[in-house]
Image: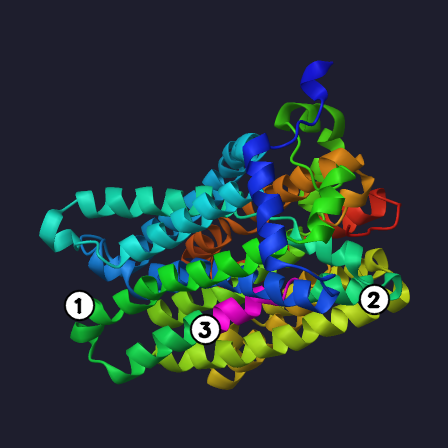
Amino acid sequence: MASDNVQGPNPNSAAAERDARLVSTDHKVDPSEIAIGVIIGRAAEYFDFFVFAIAAVVVFPKVFLPFAEPVTATLYSFAIFSLAFVARPIGTVIFTAVDRRYGRSVKLTVALFLLGFSTMAISFLPSYAQIGAWSLYLLSILRIGQGLALGGAWDGLASLLALNAPVERRGLYAGIAQLGAPLGFAVAAVLFSFFLLNLSEEDFLSWGWRYPFFCAFAVNVVALFSRLRLVATEEFSRLLDLGRLEPSPILPLIRNHSRELLIGALIPLASFALFHLVAVFPISWIDLFTQRSVGEFLMVQTSGAFICAGAIVASGLIADQMGRRKLLMISAGLIAVFAICSTIAPLIIEENAIGQTIYVNAGFALLGLSYGQSSGAVTSRLDPRFRYTGAALTSDLSWLLGAGFAPLIVLFLSARYGLACVGLYLLSGAVTTLLVLSLSRSEVRQV
């Protein structure tokens, strides 16, 4: 049917992108250059993401939800946090249409400006004491804006990196594309830690927390130019001409590849659940139920983020030796063991600082091992013309199913039934990943 055909971008946009290639590139781009662009772009996205996540624990319950008791206020805050994950697939649908009509450069520009603006605008929000419930409505709207923008920020550069990397090093380069996550978290955590440790609580809640949000716009502008430079390369144009990184219509994608989309969303479930259970949930537990300084704990998590980065690189080297599917199964099994240990001995993260540190660092190490190879896990099974949009949509669904509601659900259960619920929730994700990998026999490759 005609509706199934993949249409190219608007001719005027295509001409503009060809002009950009003539201006910005006159040589073949090395995979290492693509890797740097991917890392910068992902780090900017995750910086925005984690600035909101940390503030959802240490700021929003006090500034925007002072009418509720602390645990309830944090649960409400996590509910607002989850809105972006619901909006993200919608953003992919909207921005795919923009991409097809106006071109990828326009899509990226609009998406990253929306992301930067939504994050920066939060820094100017009046508190609940000033404008009442409107502060919550505005915070929710801006959070939805972040989610829509993240759906549009998908640029295909990770796929370009994998396709341009040496065949024997594709696992390594696929892992490198994931380094933006721990780097973005580390920058956000260090910023919040600095203000928490050096300001009084009154000053922090008045103006200190606003600074990381305010920085987001500048960070996203830098990321935008870094990514546009690569989108304008001859390699990217060549892959577009081959139809391998072309935005495809959503309905034909779902109709022809619904099974692959579901498998792609479920395979990373263990990794994405662990993501929030070591990066977001522990901050809420430390803040609500222990006497430990959140600022100090954020520095512990920063060290864990660097461990995660090292494990991501290691995951690529290992995947190149044994294959990605086998590594994903091993890492899911290790996450299951970690979850069982957390269920049997939940007190290690209750009041024991050493136990908390061990839990966080071990969790981040496992996260790097699994997350490094989880992205786009089954996109090689899609028809070439559907891979670009299919990779974006599977990523959206994975975050929604595996991570979007994890802090909310786990805090709700843990506050009522104890910390063993953390391990049980994580175990369910690990079991799901193992079952789906067992049912999906073909080798998992990222392209």
Residue tagged 3: 187
Relative depth, front residue between 77 and 31: 31
- The nearer-to-camera label among 1 and 3 is 3
Relative to residue 336, is residue 141 drawn left or right?
left
Whether pointer 1 and pointer 3 mark residues with C-beta atoms closer than 8 Å, the reply is no
Relative depth, front residue between 345 and 277: 277
Q: In the rendering, which numbered label is found on residue 206?
A: 1
Residue at 84%, 47% (x, y): give it: 438
Residue at 43%, 59% (x, y): give it: 221
Kind of residue at disc 1? Ser
User: In the image, residue 156 lies at what x, y percent?
Assistant: 65, 49
Which residues are drawn in magenta? 177-187
Kind of residue at disc 2? Arg
Kind of residue at disc 3? Val
Question: The N terminus appears in which quarter of the rendering?
Answer: top right
Residue tagged 2: 169
Among numbered discs 1 and 2, the one appearing first in the sequence = 2
Instruction: Estimate the spatial distance between the alpha carbons at disc 1 and disc 3, rounded to whole Å.
Output: 21 Å
Instruction: Specify few, some or many for label 2: CA neighbours under 10 Å numbering under 14, 14-19, or 20 or more.
Output: some
Whether 390 is drawn above or below 328: the answer is above
Among numbered discs 1 and 3, the one appearing first in the sequence = 3
Q: Any magenta on residue 180? A: yes
